[in-house]
Structures are given as structure tokens and as C-alpha cells.
Amino acid sequence: MKFVRTIVVLVALAITVLFAWQANSPAFAKGPVSPTGTVPSCQGTNLLEQLKTQDAATYQALINRENAVPNGKGLLWKIERNGTPASYIYGTMHVSDERLTTLPGPVMETLKGARTVALELDEIVDDQKMQQAVVKNIGLIAFTDGRTLETVLSKNQLGRLKNTLKNFNMPFATSRGMKPWFVMLSLALPLCEIKRQKAGLKAVDGIIAKTAQQNGARLVGLETVREQFSAFDRMSIDDQKHFLMNSLRMMDMLDDQIETMAQLYLQRRTAALWEFATYLTKKSMMAQGRGAAQLQKELVALNHFQTELIIKRNKVMARRALPLLKKGKVFIAVGALHLPGKTGLVTLLQNAGYKMSAVY
């Protein structure tokens, strides 16, 4: 089912900890970056551009839904209230694509003027601190009751997983004790992106953190590693298995979906990111000949992900951002999916009394 893979890709815009840890872990993507030692580039096709030419009506319907989402366009927002020095919030994507990591002028200007920079996790600037936080919360990502992937997956499921891990240069021995949700997210980025980050290329969040440190800004985190892990661990093991196996079936589309997300990000169309996921859900169900009842079930699962990974976390991040904003000159950097919509951070800060205006 295509939507499951899309959800995993969407996590690249919504969660920091896994990718920061994965890129620095010796357990993943072992071996040289490439036969020539060069850093690989990631290639993909924009699926929405294909849709635009192949099915104009469906494409226009997606655009109409996108346009109906409040605050659905813009990556950089100015935050103002009562004469307090302005602060800003910026949506990121946790990949190392140079098109994204080359921060636009307005973003760099506001970042350099910040006294405080608030990230999803402040551990992102310290690899050792990140590793320690992961180990401290190992019970959320790994089985602690004797179970392994070999005991929770069928023989066929296990074979499919092993083949995929082999393609990603990830040894099964390292993954066998991990929970299905963690393995699923470990495969959320293309192998080329994992190798790029292991080669030292930083994602957008890392670039922002490094710049903040160079400018002497105070770095703070709006969440904890435990909170980010817990958002996934609340799923039942059956649901985790379901999402993992359906994700594995769609690995061949991973590069295209990452490219589509990157293009939407570059166009600053944050609302379109979720609409794209919904579109693929419906397309997949129709291609499989599934009925309305099954489609509704998949959309419910999609909404569950949105609730756990976006909406609930938005409330926590907004609550923790408010004390920082009282003094002004704060630069907040969070995954781009956290910005748009009635439950997005832009709206939540508006509801808290701040004037929000899109700058870029």
C-alpha cells in the first residue's frame, strides 16, 4: 500500500532523532560511500508532475484541497506581539539535499539575528549525547521480553525484510531485536541519503544548529528523544508489523517520493505534503480493487499517524515555545509538516496571541 511508504517518507519532515542517530551509527549502511569514494547523489521523479500531465482533474482536486488548508504555504514565519523583538519559525526537511540545505537569504538573516535557536531536539548537535539518549530509551525501540523479529514475523515476512536490509547494507543481526516500527523507520530514507549523511553531509537541521553555534546563540530542544520514540511505540505490535511489511513492498518508489517531497518543500507548499500522502492512499486502494470500506480503514490509519506524529507533538512544542517567545529573538526550526493546518504550529501560536506572517 503506497500510503504506508509515503507516511514513512513524511517522517523525514517530521522527526529528527532517528535520522540523526542512523547517520552516525556503525550498524547502518556499512562500507564505502561509493566505489570511487565520492558522495552519491539521490535521483528521483516528481510524481505530482506526472499526475499533472496524466490526470489533470485529480491533480486539480489535490491543489484545491491544498489551498483550503490554513497557513499551507510558506516555510519561514515571523512571530510578533506587543513590541517584543520578532521571532521566527522555519520548517525543515531532515535530508542533506543541497537544494534544501543551502539556506535562503531571509532564513539565514533571521537565524543570524537570533539569541535562542529552538530545535526539535538539542541532542542533534552532539553525536555522543544523541547516542546516549537512544541507549537510555532502548526499551522503546527494542524488545526487552525475549521476543525478536524472528518470533513476531512469519517466515515469508522475515525473508522479505532480510532481503531489503541486505540491499541497504544493514546486517539483520543488528536489527533482529528491534521493534518493527524502528526497523520501518530505519528504511525511511534512500540508501544514497544514508550514505550522504554518514559521509558527513548535514541535513537542514544540522546546518541550522551549526550556524547557531557559530553565532553564539543558545540552543534548546522542544522535545525529548523519549517523546519522539514514544509517538511510534504507542502502536500495537500488529500495527507495527502491518506498516513494516507494506512499507517493504513499496521500496521501489522511495527515491521518487523523496524527490516529490523535496520539490514541494522547495515550492514552500507545506499543506501539499499531506495531500500527496492522501492521494497515494486512494490511488493504491483503487489499483488493488479495494472497496470503500477498505479505503476508509486506510484513511483512518493515515489520520492516526497524523494525530500521533504531528498533532499531539505540535501541542507540546507550542507549549514549550511560548516561554521562549516572551523575550523575542527566537528562531524555531521544526519539521515542515508541523507548520500548516488548523492544528499546526502557526495556528497554535496565532491562538496564543501572536501575529504570524509568512516571510518566505
Image (spheres, rainbow, N blue to C red):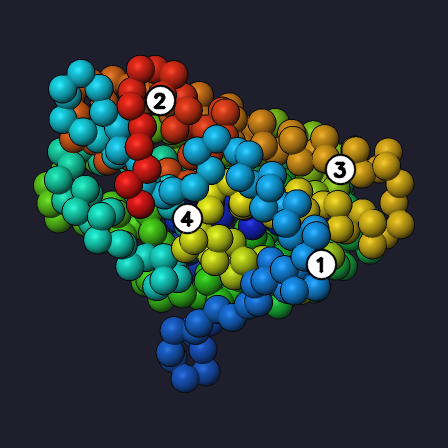
Q: Is residue 276 above or below residue 141?
A: below
Instruction: Name the residue: 14% across, 44% down.
Output: 112
Q: Name which residue type carries label 3.
A: Glu
Q: Secondary structure at mark 3?
A: helix
- Residue 266 or 55: which is nearer the viewer? 55
Distance CA(mark 1)–CA(mark 2) = 38 Å
**Discs 1, 4 touching: Cβ within 8 Å:** no
Residue 349, numbered circle? 2
Residue 274: horizontal and vertical position, in percent?
57, 41
The residue under label 4 is 268
Question: Which numbered disc flags the more N-terminal residue, 4 or 2?
Answer: 4
Residue 298, numbered circle? 3
Q: Name which residue type carries label 2.
A: Leu
Q: Nearer the viewer, mark 1 or mark 3?
A: 1
Quadrant housing residue 56: bottom right
Instruction: Name the residue: 53% across, 39% down.
Output: 67
Q: Nearer the viewer, mark 1 or mark 4?
A: 1
Mark 4 surroundings within 10 Å by alpha-carbon count, few (fewer than 14), some (14 through 19), many (20 or more): some
Residue 55, numbered circle? 1
Q: Name which residue type carries label 1.
A: Asp
Kindly give the residue lying farthest to the bottom in the view shown.
36
Question: Which numbered disc flags the more N-terminal residue, 1 or 2?
Answer: 1
